[in-house]
Image (spheres, rainbow, N blue to C red):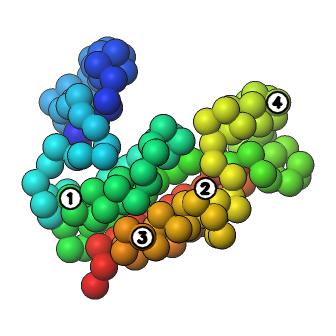
Amino acid sequence: MIGLDVSKAMIEIAAENIQKHKVKEHVDLVVGDARKLPFRDSSLDFILSTGTLHYLRDLAEFFRECSRALRKEGKALICELSHDVSSKELKEQSARWKRPSRVLKLAALMHGIPRMEYVKDYVKASLKGAFVQYNVRFKGMLTELVIRKPV
């Protein structure tokens, strides 16, 4: 497994967690930019990205990078919070994650991307512009975007 973050400080925190959980022999850490993934073409089986999209200006660039780095059968799972959920969904998410609903809503407002962006606005346009195969699933406050190489 390879962990990647643009922030050296976050990589240092990850290194501490890896040491604490005794998985150092299974994880390598790299300081790098998601917009220019430091991996060869078709070299990765799986990419997991959490809470990254709201930091990026050019989402299509990131989506193309994921596709470039993935092997033929690989996939990228990009997870983001979405604040535009019903109060029922928010309450259910709060129970599942054992976190106060106000905290989840605030986190999603500060760091999330609304669902509508995936179905009719910026994220959808970026996906189309990147020419990648994708599907989107809404699971409560969590939005899962799956990207695959085009066939």
Q: Which residue is mark 1?
A: 69
Q: Marks 2 and 1: in contact by CB < 8 Å?
A: no
Residue 90 placement (x, y as % from top left): 81, 46
Separation of marks 1 and 4 at Cα, in angstroms: 37 Å
Q: Is residue 131 above or below residue 45?
A: below
In the displayed structure image, the side of residue 64 where residue 49 appears, left or right: right
Residue 124 placement (x, y as % from top left): 55, 67
Separation of marks 1 and 3 at Cα, in angstroms: 18 Å
| Mark linked to residue 102 | 4
Q: Which residue is mark 2?
A: 143
Question: Could you tell me which residue is drawn at 29 percent across and 73 percent down?
Answer: 149
Q: Earlier in the sequence, mark 1 or mark 2?
A: 1
Observer-nearest residue: 25 or 39? 39
Q: Which residue is mark 3?
A: 129
Separation of marks 2 and 3 at Cα, in angstroms: 20 Å
In the displayed structure image, the side of residue 18 where residue 91 appears, left or right: right
Question: Could you tell me which residue is drawn at 61 percent across and 36 percent down?
Answer: 111
Using the rendered image of the protein, determine whether residue 3 is visible from the camera's viewpoint.
Answer: no
Residue 44 placement (x, y as % from top left): 20, 57
In the displayed structure image, the side of residue 12 where residue 99 appears, left or right: right
Secondary element under disc 2, as helix, strand or loop, is: strand
In this view, the mark in front (3 or 4): 3
Q: Earlier in the sequence, mark 4 or mark 2?
A: 4
Secondary element under disc 1, as helix, strand or loop, is: helix
